[in-house]
Image: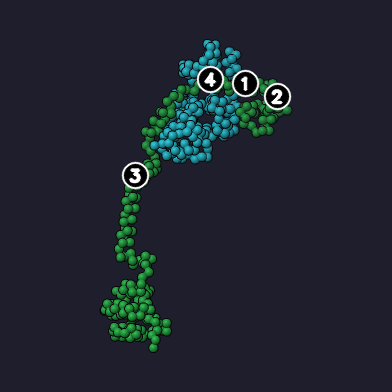
Amino acid sequence: MSRALRPEADETELIQRARNGDSQAFGALVERYQRRVVGVAQAVVHNQDDAIELAQETFIRAYENLAKFESRSSFSTWLYRIAANLAIDFRRREGRHPVLRGEDAEAEIQRLPSPRGDAFRETARAELSGRINEALKELTPEHRAVILLREVEGLSYDEISEVLQVPRGTVMSRLHYARGRLRAILKDLGGS
Amino acid sequence: MARCEDIRLLLGPFEDGELEPHEMQEVARHVVGCSACDGELADYRMLAVSLRGATAMPDLGGFTEAVIARVEDLPLPIGLRIQRYLTSFTSGIGATVAAGLATAAVAIVTAVILTPYFRQIPFASQPQRPAEIARNAQPTTKVHQDVASNDVQPGLPADIANSLSPGTTGNGIAPVVGLPGSSGNSGTIISRLEADSPSVAVWSEPQTDTTVIWVPDQQR
């Protein structure tokens, strides 16, 4: 029987309890990191359904390998690295070009949560989302992953470097390129 | 003033707060006086906001439950299974076994204490009177070679003492015990000695397997 969990239960304690087979403690860790793990996967594969499946797989792998987790890196970074590796493998295995095309892109845009507001704001939001997604399609998976991890998930350069297992300098150069490219694409889209 | 080409490489890290303090100051000073770089920085900010707004987070309702369900279907790692088995053994069967062992130990100790064997344990022996020592020592006493050669017979205390202690020293210690094949006789002698002379002391020396009878020097 597992003890009741405090909402702010210490991460180390949760990990230790999860190692001892306490699924409730592991559930607390899942609850804590699920959004960002999905975000990391989504940054790489750029597909929500695939990202959710990969995130689930990430947590299963993490649970199976909890005994191997050493506190050299933070638990979150360790999770994100598993998610990124799974997503990269998935992308290679499936041979998918991880960008949205045609109807898929439209469907993705339609699935965006609709904030309450007037019709004009709704249209503007959908239009902006469409333009952003169009621009993202133009990037390579590597550049897209880096900029989404930075701008959407808020990872630091060091975290991105660790998650994607590339040097920090590579992270900086990819970000510089991706930003410049997106800026140019969005200006072109805005002008057309 | 730094060139724009150099500063542009640093605009992104500047916006992300990933530069060294001196680089942050350098970029900040440049941007204040350079509208092109300031505009590019503003574009980066707008881009970040747009990306966050456009990237939808899927509904994660039921996600945790789905993961937990899969986790609970997984076979436990072998180490954890052994640990759990040992834990249950200790808390269940182990407790019963431990209680049984404790009860058995108490029973054994009680039985030993209540039997004569316990008295043979040196630390458990109570101080005994000289006569008891002599009696207890009788079955194992041996006849001193010098004494054995004497034909000791019951008699007057002085005679007995003399007959028992041909090698009596000045301090009155006579290394004498029993008689060959007739331990009952030695007991009789000791009893008589004790009865006739209260100052007679008898003790045993386990190291030499000898019972010592101390008789005070006779008044001649």
Disc 4 marks which amino acid?
A: Ala
Of residues A26 and A2, the one drawn nearer to the viewer in this rendering? A2
Q: Are marks 2 and 1 in contact (CB under 8 Å)?
A: no
Marks 1 and 3 belong to one chain:
yes
The residue lying toward the viewer, choosing from B56 and B133, is B133
Element type where label 2 sits in the image:
helix
Evaluate if marks 3 and 4 touch, with contact meaning CB atoms under 8 Å apart: no
First along the sequence among labels 3 and 4: 4
Is A141 in front, or is A2?
Answer: A2
What residue is drawn where x is 51% and y is 15%? A116
How many C-alpha atoms fall within 10 Å of the one at disc 4: few (<14), some, or many (≥20)?
Answer: many
Q: Residues within 10 Å of mark 3 (few under 14, many from 20)?
A: few
For marks 2 and 4, give the CA distance.
30 Å
Q: Which mark is residue B92?
A: 3
Callout 3 amino acid: Gly
Instruction: From the top left corner, tell me how far across and down residue B22 is, in percent.
Output: 68, 33
- The Cα–Cα distance between marks 1 and 4, rounded to whole angstroms, is 16 Å
| Marks 1 and 4, the one that precedes in the sequence | 1
Q: Which residue is mark 4?
A: B54
Please, what secondary structure does the residue beneath circle 4 have? helix
Can you see residue A191? Answer: yes
Specify how the rendered protein is coloured: by chain
